Amino acid sequence: MDPSLPQNDTLRRGSACLPCRRRKQKCTAERPSCGQCVRGSRQCQYDLPQASLEERLQRRVDALENLVASYSQITPVHGYVPGNPQSQVPLAGTAPGGSGHGQYSSYTNVPPELVDHLLATFFKYSYQFNFPGNEPNFRAAMQFPSSDPRSPHPSLLNAMLLVACRWSNRGTLELETYLSNKAVSELNNSQGDAARLINTVLAASLLCRYSLLVGQLARASYLASSALMFAKSCGLHRLPVHWDDRSPDEGTMFLLPPPQSKSDFCLRISVWWSVYLLDKDVCHVCGIASSVLDEEICTPWPSEFAFFENANAGMTLPHVFVSNQMVMNIEDLLICMKAKAVALHDAARREYRWLREGRYRTWQDYVSRKQHLEAILSAFQRSLASVDPKQFLSSVGSRNNLHTPDVSAIHHTLLFAHSSLLAAQITLHLAGSERTGDLRAARENAYLMAALVRRGMDVDRAKGSPRTSGQLDAKDIYWHCGPCWDVALGVLREEQSSWDQGSITSSDHQSAVRAHISVLSHASKRLQDFARR
């Protein structure tokens, strides 16, 4: 080693000159020429100075903001149809309240016309995200400045726009990146905003939904856990049956004070079950256990408030597991159907897991629990209307004057509920099939699942041809139907593989099973392709 070179100096990574790098020599990094280049009579050259991390991030932010600003150059046309992604955005100044371009400036840098379009798209498909609230009320609240406690928190708006990009033909990767970063930034700054804690719970939930759609499972798991823990800290899982009752945890300090009005009470109930559904979805997809036990929950099911004052109301989660009280009430909202179906599917998966882990002391203990859960599943399945929104709407219309939801939302919810219940029954049959011989029953339920999907989704429709009445496209279907269908698909593929091992079946039966496999695999792939497009 050359004694003239400094022995103890440590160079910052990347500060050596180019000739020393090529020769793999230790560089003194002196400028304009280092000691090695002077002694070797070589021309000393250095890389151009690198920008700092802050400068590179700022350049990226500037590029994204310029891209978002370019959307304002789109020429609007008349004939805008709210909620229709194919139609053009309205002219500036047509937003509710007449505030025009200044309406959203305090919330986001996205042009107002694009915000209008994405909001309309979001509320058209809001049943996909189990979002509590409606478009007129949300837009009315946005007439206030973003700093006003009566307005939506900016993190919530940006999260809504982000999710809507997946259902809109106007979304781009750059726009989604900008909205995601903006929503996360606003969410991190919302911790001191005690007046809008519900907004931050919903924002975290929507960010989690988006992460699930794009395949970011680790981030989705983290966000779902954060949203659930935050909702529990607000006391949303321990609400009383009636809004003016005392809390079952009176004396416990939650982040939110007791509800001050009926509307606030109903909102908290809906938000809790929205977060509950999200947690179960993430646990199912990621294969993890929930951080909240069903026994901890006493919040009643969401319903129109009038029904909290009669005998059919005030039902809580433990009510699901009482077989003689499982009559489905028309007044139960669609989110209630989903929550009940998810709770039962989760219970079936828990029984399967506990049996495999040897948690039952005797086989009879498992059989008793299995039979009880099967009775509850059958009762709930019978109480559901068929996957026909017209029949459901007619039954709703024959009762009280409830707000009639969108036909696609009803169809989507019934399809998901039936799919969850069939997946739960298959899971129970598979759990002890070695001893009880329930494999045949599992296969029969898998056949029913394929028939359900064929009836409810346009899996056989040729591209460009119209859909059959009562069928849904992939963008209209709850994405978490896919894991339920995969349960049935696994059973059918296992049956198909048994033919190669000498199992005797007729050619007609084999053809039918292949057709079922084709339907389920095609439908599941359609959902994945839409989510990951």
Image: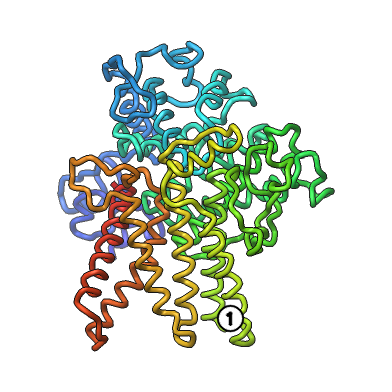
Q: Where's residue 187, x and y in %?
A: 54, 38
Q: Position of residue 497 (x, y in %)?
A: 26, 79
User: Which residue is denoted by mark 1 in the rendering?
Assistant: 367
Can the viewer see residue 70?
no
The residue under the point 58% across, 69% down is: 373
Disc 1 on helix, strand or loop?
helix
Applied colour scheme? rainbow
- Find residue 404 and report its horizontal and vertical position in percent: 51, 34
Name the residue located 61 percent from the left edge and 75 percent from the top edge.
Answer: 369
Q: Is residue 492 left or right of residue 385?
A: left
Say above or below: 101 vs 62: above
User: Which quarter shows the N terminus?
Assistant: bottom left
Picture layout, residue 496 above or below residue 469: below
Please tell me whether residue 146 is drawn above or below residue 168 in the rendered image: above
**Left or right for 139, reference 8:** right
Q: Quadrant of residue 189?
A: top right
Crowding around mark 1 (Cα neighbors within 10 Å: few <14, some 14 to 19, many 20+) is: some
Considering only vertical position in the picture, is 301 above or below 382? above
